Every structure is written in structure tokens, then in C-alpha cells.
Image (tube, rainbow, N blue to C red):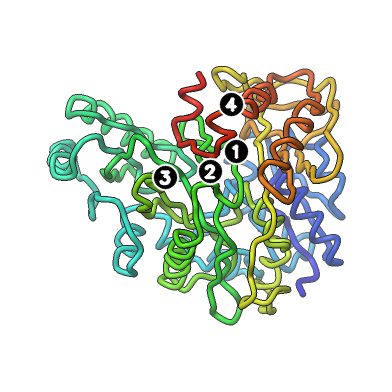
Amino acid sequence: MIESLLVANRGEIARRIIRTAKRLGIRAIAVYSEADADLPFVAEADEAVLIGPPNPAQSYRNAEAILAAAKATGAQAIHPGYGFLSENADFARTVEASGLIWVGPGADAISAMGDKINARNLMAAAGVPVAPGTTDPAADLDAAVTAAAEIGYPVMVKAAAGGGGMGMGVAVDEAALRTEYDKVRAFAERMFGDGSVLIERYFPRVRHVEVQILGLADGRVVALGERECSVQRRNQKLVEESPSPAVAPQLRSRLLAAAVRAGEAVDYRNAGTVECLLDPTSGDFFFLEMNTRLQVEHPVTEYVYGVDLVEEQLRVAAGLAPTFDPDALAPSGHAIEMRINAEDPKRFLPGPGVIRTWVEPTGEGVRVDSGYTGGNTVTPFYDSLLAKLIVTGATREEVLERARNAVAAFQIEGPKNNVPFFAELLENEEFLSGAYDTAIVTRMR
């Protein structure tokens, strides 16, 4: 097993990785920015290195500073968490070229799936269903208009290099397309350094369902069930649950088989997620994208399948067999995760500030993965995620009841937060029925 691990991330995911590393007897090394010096993950690591000022470009996205910290501390491996450099193929290559172990998929797989158009084409060739869309970037506005006319409105305008729900717009007609194309292209150039745009069929009533895959050290790819991710605001997830209330056994079999084919098509190793759009009426699903990293919502899969995905990532990176029998994977129980963010619960606008009160819920079936505690300052430099509230149980009904109690017990004073939204959601009949889609938050607002 790996002996020392540098965690190239911050907040709750850094704490999460550090927790498993220390349980396994691995020396856990944190890196942190000046803004994060007082956060729990820094204190909980065996060693911590200051790598720069608050600006992510000068700290958590600063590959040179992270590699220098790894060298200075004698780290054997680097775990990137999610976000920041986790899906940067060049960084993965540099880590390995430096003689370190990269706890993630190979750089070639990251590159192949990082470009949305290339990924779509690869998946289609592998027999994974894809939605109608362009097979090459729409080089200019005229090409986008022509493609949209062939696909049929409404269409989704997407940054080819985007991810995480960013760099996307919906066009219901040509006039809207002309506006969205320029907007998405400019955003993509600014955020991703790549203005390539693809045009894809947009489904107004659809569910967002993803499959957790794990590429094992022996070359096999296995699927650890699906997660329902349809509670979203601005195309970004707020709630995830597993198993999905929309996926019956026959559909699950097809969905998981397609996800395994997706992983096999790029010789995938380590943890990854195949995201799909699901038409709940027809049962048809379409490949959306592949996230070549650990997901924010991985805890719901951990509960339902009884695995520690961070441990499995470390074992794959070390060339070891998994802790489970790949031929005997079976789900059990239900889990729901709610993303507790520092944001207005009505308009979902960020609201940083000093945390005056922080009381986490406890009890059977309740887990909190938090990045902060009382007295910490939530700064405007990073994602607004404060914590993840994960609730588990034997049935969805049991989990919903426990979730209501947990949300009521979660006390946060200081920064704005979306805990009141979850209290509202857990009384919403559409959500409680399980028959919801990606527009549920819009309808609630």
C-alpha cells in the first residue's frame, strides 16, 4: 500500500481523503492556501504545507507549488480530490513523470473524456447511447444554426471542454441560439481556455442519472450502481440518492452495462462516473459526460455498496486488488446526500461569512462530511460547499424521515446557507413520490 499521500485539495474532500488515509496507516499530507490556514483539514493532516495566497491559480491550481510540496515532504502519491487539478491530464502526466503515484485515471483517459465532442464520438463507437448532436465543434455561429436545424429545437449549447454544469445554455429557437452560442463560447474561452462548442438535443423533462464505475488494477471495469442527481439549480446538483427511484431492475442492467462499456473504451483505471440523461417515459438514456475523478456524491454509493471508494482508489493506484468481490456486487439499502452550501436558499446566490454557530446532526444513519466548523470563515475564493449531509437506511421512506430530522437539527449561523431549502424539499410531494426531474427546483421557485 502507499505509505505517504499528499492531498491536492481543500475542505470536506481533503478531510474525507485524510480520514481514510490515516485509517490505513498512510501518512497524510495537506496543502493549503493562506485563506484556509484555520480549516479542519489542515489540523487533521499529519503534515501541512502552505502553497500560496487565496487565489486558486496561485495555490490549489498551482501545479509547481503542489509538486514542490510533495518533494519537500517525501510524499509517495498525490490524490487530487475533485475540482482544481483533478481532471487536468497535463498535471497527471507531470505527477507520474516526477516519479509519484497519481491516484486517479490515466492521463490519456482524462484527455479522451475531457473533450465533450470527442467523448460523445468515442461512446457512440463503443455502443453507448448518445443524444442527437454534433460530431465536430460548431466552428462558428452559422455552423451552430445549421446543426440546430438538423437536430431540432430545443437544443443545448455546451462548452466542449466544460464540466460540472458550467458552460451550458438552452436555445428554444434560432434567435436564442445566436445569443447562447456567443455567451457559451466566451465563457468557455475564459474558464477553460477552449472556446469549442457543441450542439446537442435538449430534453425539457428529463432525469439526470449517473453510474459509479471503478477500473481495477487487473484491467476490469465494474459498476457500483447508479445515483439519481436530478435535484439541481443552474445545472448543478443539490441532492443525490442511490438507488434511483426511476430505475427499475431491467433499466439498471442496461445502464450499468453501458457505463462499463464506456470505461472499457478508454481503458479506464480508478474511480469515475458516467453521467446520463434519462427519459422517464420511454426509459431511453443518453450519455452526457464522464467525470474522470471521485464525485462529490460518492458517499451514497459507499453506503449502498458497502465500500470505501477512497480506499479502493488507493488500492488501484498501488496495483492492489479491491477489498470486495467484483463478481458479487449487490446494492443494499438507500442513501440520500444533500449539499449544504453557503448560499441563499431562495435564489442560491453565494453568501460567505464567519460561522458563529455550527451544530451537526447525529443519530443512526446520519453522516456529515464537513469542511468547516464553528469560528471558521467562509471566503469568496472557492466553491460554496460547506458540508454534505448523508442520510442512510433500509428503505427510501426511512431515509426521508431521518433526513427531515437531520435537517431540522443542523444549525448554522453566520453565512447564508441552504438548509431551509432542504427542509422545504423534504416536504415536497413531487420529491417524496420519487417521480421528479431536473426542473423540480425551478417549479419549487
C-alpha span from label 1 to label 4: 14 Å
Label 2 environment density (alpha carbons within 10 Å; few <14, some 14–19, many ≥20): many
Verify CB contact (< 8 Å) between mark 1 and mark 3.
no
Q: Amino acid at mark 2?
A: Cys
- Secondary structure at badge 3 equals loop
Q: Nearer the viewer, residue 194 or 148?
A: 148
Q: Nearer the viewer, residue 239 or 74?
A: 239
Q: Earlier in the sequence, mark 4 or mark 3?
A: 3
Q: Which mark is residue 229?
A: 2
Q: Which mark is residue 239?
A: 1
Please say if 316 is above or below 402: below
Q: Which mark is residue 287?
A: none
Q: Nearer the viewer, residue 210 or 16?
A: 210
Q: Nearer the viewer, residue 326 or 114?
A: 326
C-alpha span from label 1 to label 2: 6 Å
The quarter holding residue 94 reads bottom right
Q: Earlier in the sequence, mark 1 or mark 3?
A: 3
The quarter holding residue 147 reads top left
Q: Earlier in the sequence, mark 1 or mark 4?
A: 1
Question: Circle 4 sits on which residue?
Answer: 428
Q: Earlier in the sequence, mark 4 or mark 2?
A: 2
Verify CB contact (< 8 Å) between mark 1 and mark 2.
yes
Q: Amino acid at mark 3?
A: Gly
Residue sitting at 53 percent across and 35 percent down? 231
Please say if 248 is above or below 431: below
Q: Measuring from the top left, give residue 162's x and y in whole percent.
A: 42, 45
Q: Amino acid at mark 1?
A: Val
Q: Which mark is residue 162?
A: 3
Q: Amino acid at mark 4?
A: Asn
The quarter holding residue 77 reads bottom right
Tag in front: 1 or 3: 1
